[in-house]
Image: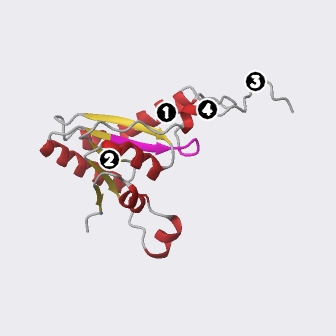
Amino acid sequence: MSTEGTSNVPNPAANAAPEPAPAGSIVVGHDGSKGAQDALSMALELARELSAPVVVSRAWSIATAPRPAGWEFGYVPAMGEFTAAVREELERDAREVAEKFPTVPITYEPVHAPPAKSLIAISHEARMLVVGTRGRGGLAGMLLGSVSEQCVRHAVCPVLVVRPAG
């Protein structure tokens, strides 16, 4: 088997800690779910009242990233292409809610890292971290782990967990 054209050198950017959001901002985790939309709506309402910017973040991996625009069978896109595809998907997923808050400054931050780890790192200097919940509880919640629970336990800033209505 030929290894020509491949590299075993790790990509330091892929393992680097994400940059913290600006001090005073509200960070919201968004995975595309209904719970994430509820969390985004709450974060934007709070940001409007507090005159704070919002950073919408999505953790991703190669397995969860959408295919980049130039993807073809047999072609392995660069990490930057995956990041751009995740950002586009994140902006598209958030658009409906974000358009209801035109005065709130919003930035989008895709992060190639596990969800809880990335949200905790990004929110380090934030005013607040807002996350949704998928409502898993009991045994499933304990076995699978909970991003919201990890954020509550380990984030430096206050964490608001937005539960689904009803």
Could you give the CA–CA distance between mark 4 and mark 2, rounded to whole angstroms? 27 Å
Q: Name the residue carrying label 1.
A: 83
- Place of residue 138 in the rendered image (x, y in percent of width and height, measured from the top left): 44, 75
SS label for mark 2 = strand
Q: Name the residue carrying label 3.
A: 5
Closer to the eye: label 3 or 4: 4
Whether residue 153 is visible: yes
Provide the residue span drawn in magenta. 56-64
Does the segment drawn in magenta span residue 60?
yes
Nearest the viewer among 21 and 53 is 21
Q: Are marks 3 and 2 in contact (CB under 8 Å)?
A: no
Task: Say which quadrant the C terminus sits in.
Answer: bottom left
Label 2 Cα crowd, 10 Å radius (few <14 / some 14-19 / many 20+): many
Instruction: Find residue 11 and name its label.
Output: 4
Q: Earlier in the sequence, mark 1 or mark 2?
A: 2
Q: Earlier in the sequence, mark 1 or mark 4?
A: 4
For the residue marked with disc 3, what is the amino acid?
A: Gly
Nearest the viewer among 5 and 123 is 123
- Place of residue 56 in the rendered image (x, y in percent of width and height, measured from the top left): 34, 41
The structure residue drawn at horizontal position 44% and vertical position 46%, both measured from the top left corner, is: 118
Q: Earlier in the sequence, mark 4 or mark 2?
A: 4
Does the segment drawn in magenta span residue 91?
no
Label 3 Cα crowd, 10 Å radius (few <14 / some 14-19 / many 20+): few
Whether residue 68 is visible: no
Could you give the CA–CA distance between mark 3 and mark 2, rounded to whole angstroms? 39 Å
Closer to the eye: label 4 or 2: 4
Could you give the CA–CA distance between mark 1 and mark 4, rounded to whole angstroms? 14 Å
